[in-house]
Amino acid sequence: MTALSFPIVRLRPKTDARKIRHGSPWVFDNELVMDRRTKAIAPGTIALLEDGAREPLGLVAVNCASRIVARMLDRDPNATIDVDWIHARLARALAMRARIYDAPYYRLVHAEGDGLPGVVIDRFDDSVVFQPNAAWTETLKAEFAEALLRLEGVTHVLKNASGRARVLEGLDDSAEVLAGGAPDGPVPVPMNGATYLADLTGGQKTGLFFDQRPNHAFAAQLAPGARVLDVFSHVGGFGLAALAAGAAAVTCVDGSAPALALAEGGAAAMGQGDRLSVRCGNANAQMEALAAEGALFDLVVCDPPAYAPKKSALEKGLRAYERVAMLAAPLVAEGGYLVLCSCSHAADLSRFRAACSRGIGRALAGSGRTAQLIHTGFAGPDHPMLPQLAESGYLKALFYRL
C-alpha cells in the first residue's frame, strides 16, 4: 500500500506539528480534523497523518473511539506495516535485551519506548505473553504472532487481554493462545538470585512484573539478616529477592490468595519456605493490624497498584500514597528502611515524593525520628522510556532510612 492509497487524517490548522516532528507519538482527538470521513475510519486502520498544510508526517494507527486517535508507527509515509516491519522492530528490541540480560526473562517490548505503540510483550524463555493494548495491534495479532515466532527460541505466543488500556481502546478481554501452547502450570523465573513463579494465563497482567528488577536488587542489599515486610507483594517481588539475599524472615501481604500461593511456591523452590509467611487481606488493614500487634521490621516495602492512573485521579491517588506511607513508617524499626513505590504515570516523581514525605512526617511526628531519602529507583532498561512521552517513565521507588 502506497502513501497515496492510505486513508488520510489531518491535524487542525492551529495544531502545532512540531511536537509530532520532534518525536511525540500520540495525536489526540482535539488536535485532528474529526470530520465524518475521519470518524468513519475503522479502529485499527493504518492511515497517513498530514499537518494542516497537507504535508505528510508519517503513518499512524487510528482509533476514533479513543482519546488518542492516532499513534505514530513510522515516519516514512511509504513504509509497509506488515510481518517484516513488525519483526524488524522486535529484533531491534531483542538485541538490546540480549546484550543486557543473561537469561531470556524480561520485557521484550515496552510499547512506545520500543517503537510499537500500545504493545507490551514479556518473555519467559520460550514463551512470550503478548498484550495488544491498542486497536491496531489487535487487528494485526496474527502478524505479531508470526513475527515473534521468527525470534530465536520463541515457540509459544500467548495473548493477554486484561487491563485498563484495552477498555479505553474499546477492546474485549478475550485471552487466547496465538501459537504453540499454554504452560501446564506456573513458570519458574530466575531473577536477582530468587525463583519466582509466574502464572502466564491466569495471573495479573502478563504474570510477573519485570519492571521492579533493579529496585528488588537494591532492596536486597538491605536485607541480609533483616526482618522484611513486603506489602502489596503480588507473587513475592521484593520478599523473594530479600530471601535470596539472606533475610532472616519475610512476611508477604497481598489481597490475592493465588498470588500469595505463588510467593510461597517460589520460596519453597528456593528451599526457604520456612522463612516466608503470608497475610491475605486489605493491605492498609493488615498494616494497621501489624501495628496493633507491635510488629517491627528492618525493611518494609510497599508497592501498591496505580492509585493515580489518570490525571483526574491524581489528588485522590496522592492522598492514598500518603496514607500508605503513614501506615508503613511506624512498622519500621529504628535505623530500618522503608521503600515506597508508585506505578502511576499521572503522579510524577516530585508529587509522589511529596506525598510520601507528608505521610512519613505525620507518622513520625513527636517520635524524635527523622527520615533520610537514600535512593530513588526506576524501571529497568527493558522498560525504555521514550523521551517525548512522559507516560513511558511511570515507575518510581523511594528508599528511606528512618
Image: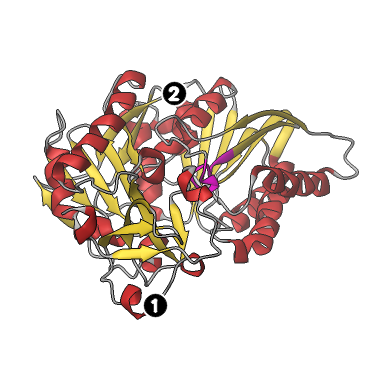
- Helix, strand or loop for disc 2: helix
Residue 151's quadrant in the figure?
Answer: top left
Between circles 2 and 1, the one closer to the viewer is 1
Q: Position of residue 353 (x, y in %)?
A: 71, 43
Q: Is residue 284 left or right of residue 334?
A: left
Q: Position of residue 365 (x, y in %)?
A: 87, 45
Q: Residues within 10 Å of mark 2 (few under 14, many from 20)?
A: many
Residue 125's quadrant in the figure?
Answer: top left
Viewer-closest of 378 and 357 = 378
Q: Is residue 148 left or right of residue 365?
A: left
The residue carrying mark 2 is 244
Is 219 above or below relative to 86? above
Q: Is residue 133 left or right of residue 45?
A: right
Question: For the view shown, which residue lies furthest in the left direction?
Answer: 180
Residue at 65% in and 43% down: 349
The residue carrying mark 1 is 35
